[in-house]
Amino acid sequence: MKAKEVHKLSDDELTVEVKRLRRWMFDLRTQAVTEKIEDTSQFKKTRGDIARLLTEQTSRRVSKSSSEKTS
């Protein structure tokens, strides 16, 4: 997921996407224990996507709170 795509998402969509990716990470870890994973790069890609989404959520929260303080 690219940063431009993340910026276009609404707050609710960000939350849903974070939950979905965290579930996917859980499934990947489960597969790593129970069976062989063909594409191990999925761990890094998924962690990066989660971090990107959480960063966007935090920046929106900070900008929202700073705009409320200045008003």
Image: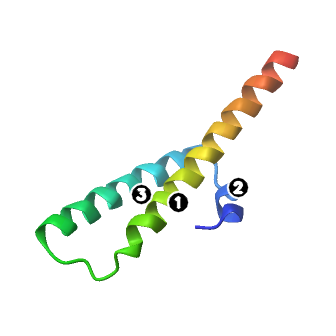
Point 41% across, 49% down: residue:
19
Q: Which mark is residue 7?
A: 2
Residue ID for mark 3: 21
Is residue 71 shown to the viewer in this render?
no
> Label 3 amino acid?
Leu
* Rendered image quadrant of residue 23: bottom left
Point 38% across, 53% down: residue:
22
Q: How many marks?
A: 3
> Label 1 amino acid?
Asp
Spatial distance from mark 1 to mark 2, Cα to Cα? 13 Å
Residue 22's place in the image compared with 39, above or below, is above
Residue 13 in the image, given as x and y percentages of width and height:
55, 51
Residue ID for mark 1: 49
Point 34% across, 75% down: residue:
40
Point 71% across, 63% down: residue:
4
> Label 2 amino acid?
His
Q: Quick check: marks 2 and 3 in contact, CB under 8 Å?
A: no
Spatial distance from mark 1 to mark 3, Cα to Cα? 8 Å
Quadrant of the snapshot with the N terminus: bottom right
